[in-house]
Image (cartoon, rainbow, N blue to C red):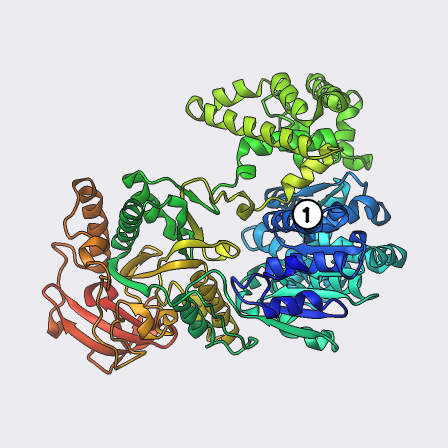
Amino acid sequence: MAIYDSLNDMQRLAVETTEGPLLILAGAGSGKTKTLTHRIAYLVSEKQVSPWNILAITFTNKAAEEMRTRVSQLVGFGADQIWVTTFHSTCMRILRRHIDKLGYDTNFTVYDSDDSKTVMKNVCKKLNIDTKNYKEKTLLNAISHAKDNLVGVSEYSMSTFGDFTKIVVAKAYREYQEQLKKSNAVDFDDIIFLTVELFKRFPEVLDSYQERFKYISVDEYQDTNKAQFELIRLLADKYRNLCVVGDDDQSIYKFRGADIRNILDFEQYFKDATVIKLEQNYRSTQNILDAANSVIANNVSRKNKKLWTDEGAGHKIRFLQLDNAYDEAETIVDDIASTARRDSLSYNDFAVLYRTNAQARLIEERLVLRGIPYNVVGGTNFYARAEIKDMIAYLKTVDNGLDEVALRRVINVPKRSIGPATIDKLLDFAEITDDSLFGAMENADNIPGLGKAATKINSFVSLIYSIRDELPRIGISGVLRALLDATDYEDYLKDQDEESADDRISNVDELINKATVYEENNEEPTLTGFLEEVALVSDIDNIDSGDGKVLLMTLHSAKGVEFQRVYIAGMEDGLFPGMGTISSGEREEMEEERRLAYVGITRAREYLTLTCAKMRMMHGETQFNPVSRFIREIPKELLDGALPRSRYSDDEPAMIERGSSNRPAARLRSTATPEYRKPAMQNEIKSLNAIAGLSKGMPAAALGELSYATGDVVRHRKFGQGTVISIVKEPRDYKVTVDFDAYGQKIMYASFAKLEKV
């Protein structure tokens, strides 16, 4: 029992509660992975449960790999029989064995988002859907939402009730699924949807997995959607030994279909459930935790818990309000540079988080100018690069000739004189003969009108045949090299762009490295398995926390990682929370945003800096947004840097814009402007001022020219109707504060705002 001595009392209780439904409410940094892995070890060593009968599911490959490693260390012999995997990987393993019962071949292909878009374009073309009125992305989102909620084609079609938009979606849904099946392909949402369908249609298959998995654990349960909930419910229905671990306060993926009610209503679904709270935090200082607790306490839909630590109060949370977004970016980057140098820190100890990807631009520019290495999570994914998608498409064609999307991508790459007209003839023949595109290509000599193109097609088919025949001998990495040689792909890249060719060739080399590692790590490597592994990779799986680079990422991408020093930029109402959330008035929307703030705050171990700008350009306009309400929900005694006066609080002290109790303000942001910065800064400020109506030569509004006064109701072309709160005379213009009905308080200049009295 020595391995359990490091557990705290609540962790140990969770480990030793093995029978029946169990909900572990694990706050941020409370050691949930440790608890889960020790619970699995306890099942094997103390309860004598066979490793074969244990299933542990999480969301990302990275989390699954970490859990697998820990379980192996704790359990030792037999650990390899435990399924420690992701939702999608679990379902893929099941579908690889049984999807033929649903009319697919077991070597099916998984389509990524780009593949799905290609299919939907074909669907819209075939059904004459006007993509100006019904965008492909909108149709795909509707289909994805339906699958997340286990609504199939027939059920969706019956629910249209004369709704013309839903009728169009229903037609597109049906044709989309038919094209996928014809290509022996599934999309990402199908993986779980089809597994649930398999279990419901074939009880004997479900029973075999219920007998296999008598003890089931699910991590990050707050992120599950209806389809995932139903999958777990079906698997656990027989023995009911279901342990779910999650934190309702970190449920931030509603836009992906996550349903917070799954965790909030767990005791209603499982009446005999035990609930255990893990509230002791092992990551952050108490000041950071108190800030997070204070913010999240404003949510109504949550289970009551409060994070605490015995590691001490730590440093206060720095709050900095800068003049504009440019100054915000420079202050953050200057602080990273000086702190790393002074404290001998690695750059990977720093992370900058933000609400929207667009905020990264100015920060990236500052990092480049300072020569600080960085990575952006959510940038161009390695597997989304054109050259990688080409090679993957070739591999898919070798593995599964039915994959029409993959085949159409490479049929003329590099160019081999097989143009759109030829492809259309092939597709017509395929439809007439009820065959696949590749099947039509195999019969090119029998298709009228192809002419000389038939020779090119036959050559391509022969290439695929020869590579496919060589696969058992040369392996996946060998196939990639063979494809490069046979297609002269490197020359093709050089012909496209000589400057970028070397980098793109290096990317292909890295794919070969990936294939080599896959082959080394799998006793029976298969091309299908490799493609499956690639298809399930996410951005967060590619994060290397030890590469010596500052990490930039959205708050949504940050869940599951932690850093010594964290900066959260853009903490303004209108940006975070967003104006859409504020104007909607929906409590659920605001609570999701607040959970996002909670996630961001709890990423920091020792130092947390919250920044905002008085003036920020958004959507081509300069906006003057108040400090985020989430900062105002943090007790003032926790902040280093006071808040400005605002309509939210009349008794707050005047703001200290910069400074620190243990370091002078000049260390945070020098008042001198470096020479390298001046031209860019002048252009930026000129642009901001021009839009704000402050640039030299802009006609100033005279007092007598204003058609409104304090207390009047006015209308703005974007923000609608509001009441004038104050008018302040400045040297070149009047600064007008308006409380808009739908958008809250805005500060703007009269000559720019063009307000009209109602």
Rate crowding at label 1 as few (under 14), some (14 to 19) or many (20 or more) other CA atoms within 10 Å.
some
Residue picked out by circle 1: 72
Q: From where the camera sits, is residue 331 visible?
A: yes
Q: Amino acid at mark 1?
A: Ser
> Quick one: 53 or 318, which is closer to the camera?
53
**In which quarter of the view is residue 435 placed?**
top right
**Location of residue 368 with respect to 411 vertically, above or below:** below
Q: Nearer the viewer, residue 402 or 67?
A: 67
- Residue 355 vertical position relative to residue 423 in the rendered view, above or below: below
Please give left or right for residue 664 compared with residue 181 in the image: left
- Residue drawn at x 35%, y 46% is 345
Farthest-out residue, front: 2
Query: Where's residue 686, x and y in %?
Result: 19, 51
Rendered location of residue 648, percent (x, y)? 32, 78
Where does the image place residue 65, in percent across and percent down from the top left?
63, 47
Q: Is residue 690 visible?
A: no
Nearer the observer, 703 or 184 = 184
Q: Quadrant of residue 597?
A: bottom left
The image shows a total of numbered marks equal to 1
In the structure shown, which secondary structural element does the residue marked by tag 1 occupy? helix
Q: Is residue 417 above or below residue 700?
A: above
Left or right relative to 244: residue 350 = left
Depth check: 574 or 538 in front?
538
